[in-house]
Image: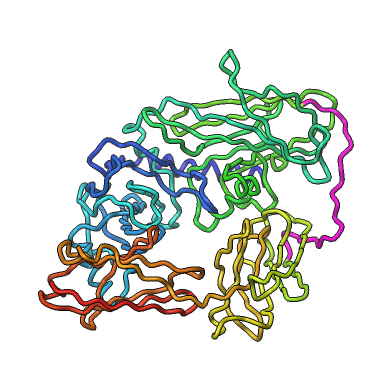
Amino acid sequence: MYHKKIIWSALLAGWSLFFAEAQPLRNPLDIPASLSGNFGELRANHFHSGIDFKTQGKEGKSVHAVRDGHVFRIAVSPRGYGNVIYLAHPQDGLMTVYAHLQRFSGTVAARVKERQYELERFAVDLTLEAGELPVKRGDIIGFSGNSGSSGGPHLHFEVRDLQTDEPLDPLPFYKKRIKDTRPPEIRAVMAHPAEGRGVVNRSSRKQQWTAVVRRNGTTGLNERIEAWGKIGFSIQANDRMDGTTNIYGVREMSLSVDGEEIFHSLVDRFSFDETRCLNAWVDYETWREKRVFFVKTFLEPGNCLRFVTGRHRGLLTVDEPRVYHLVFRLTDAFGNSETCAVDIVGKEQDIPQPDRRGTQPFVRREENRFGEKGIRLLIPEKSLYASLDFRYACREDTAYVSDLHQLHDRPAPLHHPARLSLFLLRGGRAEEERQYGIVSLRGGRPSWVGGVYRDGWLEADIRELGLAYAIAADTVAPKITPIRSGRWVREKTVTFRLTDNLSGIDSYRGTIDGHYALFEMDGKKGLIKYTFDPRRLSRGKHVLFLTVRDACGNTACHEKTFTW
């Protein structure tokens, strides 16, 4: 299996090199190329699938097609990619993606607005035929922005394989436009003794050490590490580029023991089906608790990432009383490398065995079921990244209309959703069944999951263990707040803020004089905005009516008369 993954990784790297050398791509902006994010960066539950071009902190920069082709897809959403356009380039077998746009160019914008009024909704997704909207290299297709889930003005840009829809690292297409002489940085190393099979410094717990740069310029650890048995490692690292303070993800990483490579990763391509498997590659518990990514140089049994390979799963076997020489090597897309040397002293020690009292074994390759009073849990096979000893606790909580169910004692991500069913206790406060939903709690703060009511039970899909779950009631309607209503006519823009106490905004609809009015939504800020459209709004006195519904069906309305 190890050799097959090496061959597959080599093929993927070869294809990426072929694409990069086949045809340079135009800078999608008219300003010098500078990045705020690179391909493969670690994000919550996914890899970053493109590169982020800086736009000098502003919106409205012209965005150009980087190659000849045609518009393949256009989408609008209050979250995610926001305003996004997809171009197909059949001559290269590529697709390019331009996301978080402020707005589209004239022809594209007209097509989108026509569809929005036809469907009477803001969020739309259009797929076009090859001959409908052709584009030439350099054509303006839109303007940079901050729409969707963007954290600031920039252009998110992707290159994908047109046949498979798999994202490729775009940086090789732009290496001549970007200067980078700075190697990646190794900040810390963590040891992970295999449960019941390994020990480090007489402890079976994972341990962390800060990497230091010595006087001779090399990076290593100052602590003495003694180990015995099976040990895995992970590292905290990032990359930098010239002329910027941004930090980036590490493209390539390896671990060698006594000169023999036992682990290798090259993040230059992946599929969206496997991107959630990032949670098997990082120390998920540390990320959940501290929001810090430690990347494993060993493979969990359920790690499905094709670009990660490991001999003996990348685990170090310490079974001799000698020094094991480890070298971590990190390399960026420009060939800049950094190494960290770590010595492990082999010393025989007692290996503690795990305490499995009060647990139920959950096996990764099998379907796992759990049931107690008021709870049923079904985890499909291959949803866990590693088998675990499941721990459960339950207690009453008057804030909820079910018991509070703690599912496991530490964070554990799921690759496929598990089905959770909780029993609704008597004394519920909702008038309708749809006003109940399951919530997850982290630090006592509820987060809406939702669910469907069936015969006294609420059923919903969950993607994580290690949290408490309960049933809550949402009987409060959303809140509609006009923003600067005295300026609406002067600025020719109507703006509202929409908020909800628990289940979240599910839908909204605005009309003017009974006719649909297109309110654009900024999901980050909870704002909706209608811009006066002279083709659909005549001068005179008008009545605006807005209806907002949350995920539990609670509805709020707002009516306003204005004169333009």
Q: How far from the left and from the top, in percent, is residue 513?
A: 21, 82
Q: How far from the left and from the top, in percent, is residue 21?
A: 36, 38
Residue 362 shown in magenta: yes
For the point 57% across and 50% down, the residue is: 278
Query: Hey, which quadrant is residue 532 in on the image?
Result: bottom left
In this view of the protein, which residue sits in the foreground, 559 or 39? Answer: 559
Furthest residue in direction front, as rendered: 486
Q: How many marks?
A: 0
Q: Which residues are magenta?
A: 345-366
Q: How far from the left and from the top, in percent, is residue 386?
A: 71, 54
Horizontal side of residue 477 vs 211, given as left or right: left
Query: Hey, which quadrant is residue 457 in on the image?
Result: bottom right
Query: Hey, which quadrant is residue 33 in on the image?
Result: top left
Furthest residue in direction top, as rendered: 216
In this view of the protein, which residue sits in the foreground, 284 or 485? Answer: 485
- Classified by dominant secondary structure, the portion drawn in magenta counts as loop
Horizontal side of residue 386 vs 479, given as left or right: right
Q: Quadrant of the C terminus?
A: bottom left
In the displayed structure, 268 sits above or below 402; it is above
In this view of the protein, which residue sits in the foreground, 297 or 503? Answer: 503
For the point 78% across and 73% down, the residue is: 372
Residue 409 shown in magenta: no
For the point 76% across and 27% down, the residue is: 225
In the displayed structure, 413 sits above or below 57; it is below
Furthest residue in direction right, as rendered: 350
In this view of the protein, which residue sits in the foreground, 419 or 401? Answer: 401
Q: How far from the left and from the top, in percent, is residue 540?
A: 11, 77
For the point 50% across and 70% down, the residue is: 503
